[in-house]
Amino acid sequence: MLLEIRERAQGWMAWAIVILISIPFALWGIQSYLGGGGEPVVASVNGAEITEAQLNQNVQRTRMDMRARLGDAYDPALFEGTGLRERVLNQMIEAQVMLDASQRLGLRVADAVLRSAIAQEPAFQKDGRFDKATYAQVLQYQGLTPAMFEQSLRRRLLDTQLERVVQSTAFATQTEVKQSLRLMHQQRDIRYIKLPHSDFAPSEPPDEDALHAYYEQHPDDFKSPEQVKLSYILLSPETLGADQPVSAADLHALYEERTETLKTPEQRTLRHILIALPADADEAAIAKAREQAAEVRERLLAGEDFATLAGEVSDDPLSADQGGDLGQIERGMLDPIVEQAAFSLDVNELSEPVRSRFGYHLLEVTAIEPSQVPPFDEVADELRKELQSRSAEGAFYDYAERLATLSYEVPDSLVPAAEELGLTVQQSDWLDRSGGEGIFANPKVMTAAFSDDVLNLGNNSELLEPDPQQLQALVLRIDGHRPEALRPFEEVRDDIVTILSTRQAAEAALEAAQTLAERLRQETTPVAEAVEVAGTSYTVEAPGLLERQSSEVPSPVLREAFLLPRPMDEQPSIGTLADGAGDAFVILVSAVQDGQDEALGAEVSAAESRALAQRIGRADFSHFVSGLEASAKIERKALASESAD
């Protein structure tokens, strides 16, 4: 079809069409240069306009960045509507406000600084060095020209410069450092009692009225997610491999080519006697070991049994009990010196003493299995699969291009493309936006499945490459659609029973904890190692003095313990809490030890001073930017929603 269009688009008629099309483009271009292009403006900052096109480009870049950061956890639903656009627009407004402030202050970014920042960016490097081709490729993928990227980078560096200017004025006084160290390194003597909610489970289930009321009040909790069932064509070398023809000539040619790799290695059955020698042995020890090895060799030549003698004199404990047998060996398995000697012997030939890092060896080869090339018929199937795989990889790109064209030309069915290419249309199970297994675990695939073009318009998807590391191509379409719906009450009744019963148990556990806490506050004697609640004994856990970063107790307990007031009059400070699972806790703090800068040392104090100054600097800069925005003339327009790609 494309070829036919190209052949007919010749002659005076084609030129007439080109001229007619060029006129409005030319006029539009002139109009844009004259300032009347009509580009929608979404905001202005001190007279500088932010256009809708700029906003859309930044929104798309943000999505791409989040996709790269989150990987499989990326959920397109989180980036739909106006929420993301509002956040990105706020960032653009803040950037423009900071740019205005930087220009008023006379801040600049030198070209050398810009070049250095680009060269140091890992994404633009190849083999650890800046690569111009990689730089251009990465920018092209992001839809940027070098000039656009460099302008954007210059602005970011300018923002960083402004941030440093403001933050560099921040400092922490010695009093503030001491106060911070006192709190950050504070230790508290903590005890706690856990009351599991399971111990307070209600004896009767909730009544039907309560179940129905909860169901009606929380409909969003019982909605089945939107789901789709997909038809798809998955293209890979494996799907094409079995159909690729292979000639006998090609098979025999590959057999000849692979002779060396198909060949089985030579194997030798070897036994040895080792006279051990330390690596740092002196000349006297070396001479003695060599002499001992020579004596053993003479005994073997005189007719003594190798296996018997190995068990008697060999210093290799693993092989001595086996008559010195090392089993079958191949090249590359032994010390190179020993291996060279072993592969130079004939069957039943005894070697001279061979020195290795372990000592002196006497070697004897008892059997040799020579290297062999397997018969052609034995490996023909394996070679055929290899050729088919090679052919399939070559055919993959042609098939992928044809699949893309055919599924585009007939957008309402995958059957014609499958029949034309000899492929199979497969069906998925029901899937929600979180995906499923295999290729449906890929966010890119699920984004395409729930895109407006596929889900609402009923078209085939574009050709997808689920995994850049694999040769795979995929086209899909909707085979069935289930919108989000409220599940029937009877289907979720048991879930509601569990929710309400757990909630009731958690409330009872917390009430019991609060009652216990009040009882402990009234007692004047020290808290025992166990306390009784409603006839059940609970252990008082006593981990002792803990810092804020301790992992010895549940984090909610630690957090609450450091929020409690200091104990007074030798009475513990007592509090209660319920964690996310519904379990209740009673927490007791018996003593508080503040961090002391003198005990911590000058190095810790200096590090805290720097960290505190940085925190103050960040807060100062945040207030500075808020002040700039408050004094700037900012005009916004309502944003239209935009679905995620």
Image (cartoon, grey):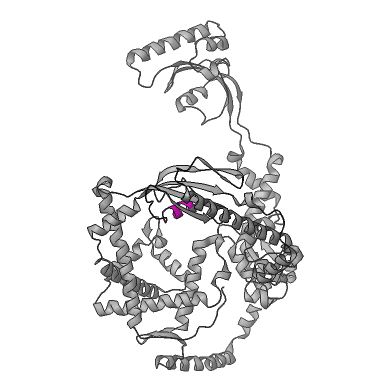
Confirm whether the magenta stretch covers residue 563. Answer: yes
Percent position (x, y) of residue 412?
72, 75
Residue 260 found in image quarter: top right
Q: Residue at x 58, y 57 (%)?
A: 470
- Asked if 304 appears above or below 359 in the picture, the reply is above
Image position of 612 (left or right of 244): left
Image position of 215 (left or right of 333): right
The C terminus lies in quadrant:
bottom right
Secondary structure of the magenta portion, mostly? helix
Q: Give the tally of numbered discs.
A: 0
Q: Residue at x 41, y 66 (%)?
A: 135
- Asked if 17 appears above or below 418 in the picture, the reply is below
Q: Which residue is more in the foreground, 439 or 384?
A: 439
- Asked if 148 appears above or below 45 in the picture, the reply is above
- Asked if 223 appears above or below 325 in the picture, the reply is below
Image position of 51 (left or right of 603): right
Image position of 328 (left or right of 132): right
Percent position (x, y) of residue 137?
45, 67
Residue 484 found in image quarter: bottom right
Q: Which residue is more in the foreground, 72 or 346?
A: 72
Residue 427 seen from this side = no
Q: Which residues, given as a range, are shown in magenta? A: 557-564
Q: Which residue is more in the foreground, 515 or 475?
A: 515
Percent position (x, y) of residue 564?
42, 55
The N terminus lies in quadrant:
bottom right
Confirm whether the magenta stretch covers residue 52. Answer: no
